[in-house]
Image (tube, helix red, strand yellow):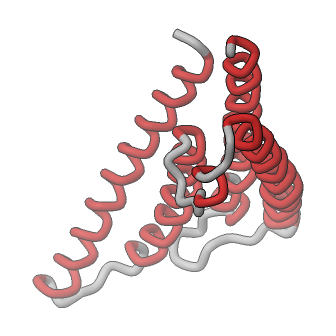
Amino acid sequence: MTLRKYIDKVIEWVLVFLMGILVLDVLWQVFSRYVMNAPSSFTDELAGFLLIWVGLLGAAYVAGQREHLAIDLLIQRSSPKRRFKLEMMISVVVIIFALTVMVVGGSWLVYTRFYLSVKSAALGLPLGMVYLVLPISGLLIAYFDMDNMYNMVKENRKK
């Protein structure tokens, strides 16, 4: 199994696990609010944190699968040579964004939340743990795009 396939499988299982917890959390929230008439205090906050993780990890996974939302009219109407150049340029821009905004900016956000000992209100969870998904997702997106670029170059040389 290649590194890429291993990373994909790990992300898939993490996403399934997080979605399972999210479903159980929301079910408990609805049950406790409407059936027991005593809403649980932590479920709303936990659902929000889980949505952050599922959203960002899911975006990294989908970007790795090249299934992300894209307007590709220009690419579809381009010649193979121009398509290759456009896809390479787009990958470079995505890598720069992922590394600067998500990894560097996200790491700064995580560091400051841990340094300032910021905790969530209901769970008492360090917010640095919640925001840790930002640099993780940025690294994954950068890795996936670098791997895609490598595969495009390798495929282009065969032609």
The quadrant in which residue 154 appears is top right
Position of the C terminus, as image quadrant, is top right
Picture layout, residue 44 above or below residue 50 = below
Tell me which residue sits at (41%, 35%) in the image. Answer: 13
Question: Would you say residue 56 is visible in this rendering?
Answer: yes
Task: Name the residue rendered at 60%, 23% in the picture.
Answer: 4
Q: Could you tell me which residue is drawn at 42 percent across and 74 percent down?
A: 42
- The part of the image, by quadrant, that contains residue 33 is bottom left
Label tally: 0
Q: Tell me residue 96's x, y (percent).
A: 86, 51
The answer to whether residue 103 of the structure is visible from this angle is no
The reply, left or right, for residue 9 in relation to residue 3 is left
- Foreground residue among 90 and 100: 90
**Left or right of 25 in this view: 105:** right
Residue in the foreground of this view, choosing between 5 and 77: 77
Taking depth in this image into account, of 105 and 64 the one nearest to the observer is 64
> Residue 109: image x %, image y %?
82, 64
Q: Nearer the viewer, residue 136 or 122?
A: 136
At 17% from the left and 76% from the top, the residue drawn is: 31
Where is residue 32 drawn, in percent x and y?
A: 21, 79
Relative to 128, say whether 44 is above or below: below
Q: Quadrant of residue 2?
A: top right
In the rendered image, the vertical position of residue 23 relative to residue 36, given as above or below: above
User: x, y (%) of residue 50?
Assistant: 47, 61
